[in-house]
Amino acid sequence: MRHGKSSWDHPVSDRSRPLQARGINDVSKVGDFFAEQGYKIDAVYSSPAERAAMTCSIFCSSIDWPLEKVVFNEKLYDFSGDLVSKVVENLNDEWHTVMIFGHNFALTKLANSWGDEAIANVPTGGLVMLSFEVNSWRKVGTNGKTELFIKPKQISI
């Protein structure tokens, strides 16, 4: 999931930019939708950047995922996708479904290179779910299927 719409109204570093009100609302909608669909996850990872961490926190609240179980990984503060790929390759093979909160262009690039649906851009607050017929995260690659691509504006309240 890409972080929600961030605010440029604060004189802070890129890593410290918070979500704006629209971003908070969008992430809540996507989290509620995800929970309503009954999806289950085994682990949650997030970039430590403020906007991604806030997105993760709001989403986890929607799905009743304990925040103390979230892993904040510096490598997810990545815009190319190279470091995100490394994180995925090293996930626990006992886990089947892992949620990752991060940034563009990394998430759009990986959704396109790993999934089977062309996605021009994962918008802020957007969620892409990919599935793979593999028995190890190290084997994740171009063999994925795009199961879900949801944009916040597609969800009506």
Image (cartoon, helix red, strand yellow):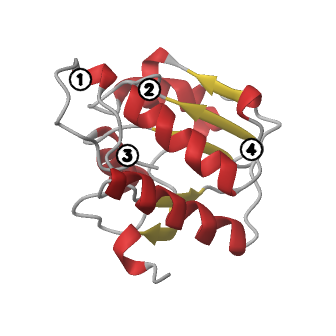
- Residue at 35% x, 27% y is 82
Identify the residue shown where x is 40% and y is 23%.
83
> Which quadrant of the figure has residue 123?
bottom left
| N-terminal label among 4 and 3 | 3
| Dot label at residue 76 | 2
* Direction from residue 72 to residue 119 in the image, left or right: left
Q: Earlier in the sequence, mark 2 or mark 4?
A: 2
Per the rendering, the mark at residue 14 is 1
Asked whether residue 146 appears in the rendered view, the answer is no
Cα separation between marks 2 and 4: 23 Å
**Residue holding disc 3:** 110
Closer to the chain start, of discs 1 and 2, is: 1
Residue 28 image position (x, y, % from top left)? 53, 60
In the image, residue 65 above or below residue 73: below
Q: Position of residue 81 (x, y in %)?
A: 34, 33
Residue at the spot of label 4: 135
Q: Are marks 1 and 4 in contact (CB under 8 Å)?
A: no
